[in-house]
Image (cartoon, helix red, strand yellow):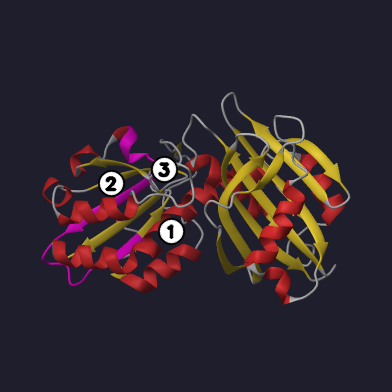
Amino acid sequence: MKRMFRIVAAISIIAAMSGCKAVNTLTDTKKSSQGKPYELIVVCPQQEWTGTVGDSLRAVLAAPVPYINQTEPLFDVLRVQERGLTGLVAEHRNILKVEVDPSIEKAAAGVEYDVTARPQIILTMQAPSDSALVRYLSENRAQIVQVLEKAERDHAIAANSEFYNPGIDAAVRKIFGVGMKVPKGYMLAKQEADFIWARYEYPTASQGFFVYSYPYEGPEALTAEALIAARNRFAARIPGPSDGSYMTTSDAFPPAFRMFRLEGRLWCELRGFWDVEGDFMGGPFVSYTTVDTKTNRVFTLDGYVYSPKLHKRNFVRGVEHLLYTVSFPEEKGTK
């Protein structure tokens, strides 16, 4: 089968990949892809896998996820050789191919979507030598991780948009004037004039989020210190398991703060850990804050995870994906 396009220069194609939509190369009769979320099949020859190329791939793809309570990799990496890329393996949702050949002019990468199954991403990296591939990985590790994570995120967003809780969407629209596609399984736990709390309870874990809003009083409202203080005011409305206990932000490790733009809108991210004042509970959280210029109010979506016995990565990713379902009235396509 022919490639969708010839492998081309590194930075330009990776940048293009991170913003493009899936391109199908077969008909609509594709099978459903195999594999778990954030599971990645790496197709790599034995010589490269046991050498510096394999070491570099593991350093990039299995790097620890930041701000969770235990060490977990970005991806669960499973390696096969080319001859093993058949049957169900070839229908995996995430595949990364490594090709080292002296006839290749320079290190580069290319991407294909939905080749043998749907949804699927196949990312191919080529280089003339092991050292060239290692250097390419080092220079482009962030972009490589970004495009693989985006593929997983797009899968989740598509599912959220199709199978969502209309009651929570209606509640968020009524209070904040904002659309939000929350997956089915979440239940509305509290609803107030400036605050909504919803949670998804598992037998041994819990995902939850709360949305809140307050008047915008200038740029100083978007500093890390101001956002942490606001978070603590609203998180205190989430009760803990014992009388008088409530959620707060852990001060053992200061939250990480960054600003970024998503579809032209400026967001502030806090990523850290939460505790329960008056009890022994805690876990990771991530919050996203922006200013609704139509109402001149600060809008925050805060997601948290409690999973003392299970891994947390996929739960955290789940609450992160909620941000990409938020739509403001002024945004094109909002209903």
Horizontal and vertical percent for residue 37? 46, 40
Q: Residues within 10 Å of mark 2 (few under 14, many from 20)?
A: many
Q: Is residue 131 left or right of residue 152?
A: left
Residue 142 colored magenta?
no
In this rendering, the count of numbered labels is 3
Residue drawn at x 43%, y 48% is 114
Q: Which residue is mark 1?
A: 147
Measured Cα–Cα span from mark 2 to mark 3: 12 Å
Magenta span of residues = 88-110
Q: Amino acid at mark 2?
A: Val
Q: Are marks 1 and 3 in contact (CB under 8 Å)?
A: no
Horizontal and vertical percent for residue 15? 43, 69
Q: Amino acid at mark 3?
A: Arg
Residue 335 visible at all: no
Q: Which residue is mark 3?
A: 93
Q: Which residue is mark 2?
A: 42
